[in-house]
Image (spheres, rainbow, N blue to C red):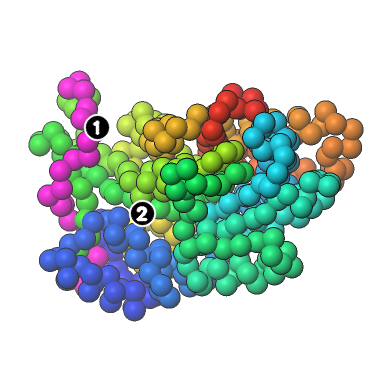
Amino acid sequence: MTGAPGESPALVDRLRAEILAAGGAIPFARYMDLALYEPGLGYYERAARVVGRGGDFATSVSVGPMFGELLARWILDGAVSRSTELSAGPVELVEAGAHDGRLAEDILDAIGRLGGADVARFSYRIVEPSPVRQAWQAARLARFGDRIRWSPSMPGRQPGGPGVRGVILSNELLDAFPVERWRWSADRRRWVEQGVTWRQDRFEWVCLPTAPPPGWALPQELEAVLPEGFVRERSPAAVDWWANAARGLEAGCLLAIDYGLDAEEFLVPHRAEGTLRAYRRHRVSGDLLDSPGEVDLTAHVDFTAIARAGEREGLTTWGCPSQSRFLLGVLESTQRVPGGFPEWTPARVRAFQTLTHPEHFGRSFRVLVQGRGPTPWDLR
């Protein structure tokens, strides 16, 4: 598979310089990192409005404020009120991957309507390393004043010192971390890492001499039948980020909403090309190396690897249900309280159907929740 340079010649030049400095090739994870996040040039650094009907892809947030409202209800009624450690005192909500701040706005608006006298307990922190995206967020969220703070990195916890007491959340963040791309060599019976080079005025794939990832050895019977060229990805960066967030959590939980799979679900026949995709204007591009900086690059999250990282840091997995099951559980809980949910207008019905229907976001997205201590909410 090859790709021609796209509409960002400065980014193409930046990538070519990186490839030259590395001796002729760079790992795909590095290519993806530059294509998405290079300051002033990467896909997520150049345009604030790439989400929704007029952008390249849709998210649960772009459906409308209901998604943030339902998350706020779960935070209030599940993660906080049922937690002995968070039932009193300040509660911090920490969001990473906030993009233009819309989810933060929806959650804070909902907490303002639903929280009653408890509203003053809640503060909101956005973890944002990019000054460009932080400016987008600050413009949208200016009306909340000092209730919102920003940090370039996840708040840490020193031994014996304070950490986050509340909820650390992300929506479609883990899938945007750079991934390594590995291809199965049937002749050599091993995984071979895929890199990117520049040849004949275009980016092309090249094999790298990297040792296969530990733990990826296959049973002999699977080695014998796995076809040549079968592709698999992994994201050490996403695993490291989750582990770091877990270390910073003193009380409460981590919540990630994303599309992904368990480890064994990656090695199935219909995923022979892997899960990495390039999106532009709601369509999948046929070439992952085409138009760097102009397309979104994303891969399915390995929820098994993420959950294990949290558990190694002492967290308990409360559950990893589909988004449909999670949001239906929130709805059922609120409907037990008279007047607990606003009137079902046609627009709200459509929004809820989009968020929960299997053909939309309901089945492909999952909600991983890990916390300190036993779960206060049934997430089976």
Q: Position of residue 12 (x, y in %)?
A: 30, 73
User: Residue 268 in magenta?
Assistant: no
Q: CA distance from mark 2 to mark 1?
A: 20 Å
- Pointer 1 residue: 215
Q: Main secondary structure of the magenta part?
A: loop
Segment colored magenta: 199-221
Q: Amino acid at mark 2?
A: Pro
Left or right, 45 with respect to 272, comes to right
Q: Position of residue 203 (x, y in %)?
A: 24, 65
Q: Residues within 10 Å of mark 2 (few under 14, many from 20)?
A: many
- Which residue is identified by label 2? 178
Indicate the amino acid at tag 1: Gly
Which percent across, then down, holds residue 234?
32, 43
Q: Residue 158: which numbered mark, if any?
A: none
Residue extending farthest left? 188
Place of residue 3 in the rendered image (x, y in percent of width and height, measured from the top left): 29, 64
Q: At 71% from the left edge and 67% from the top edge, which residue is drawn?
A: 145
Q: Is residue 42 visible?
A: yes
Residues under numbered marks 2 and 1 in contact, where contact means CB atoms less than 8 Å apart: no
204 part of magenta stretch: yes
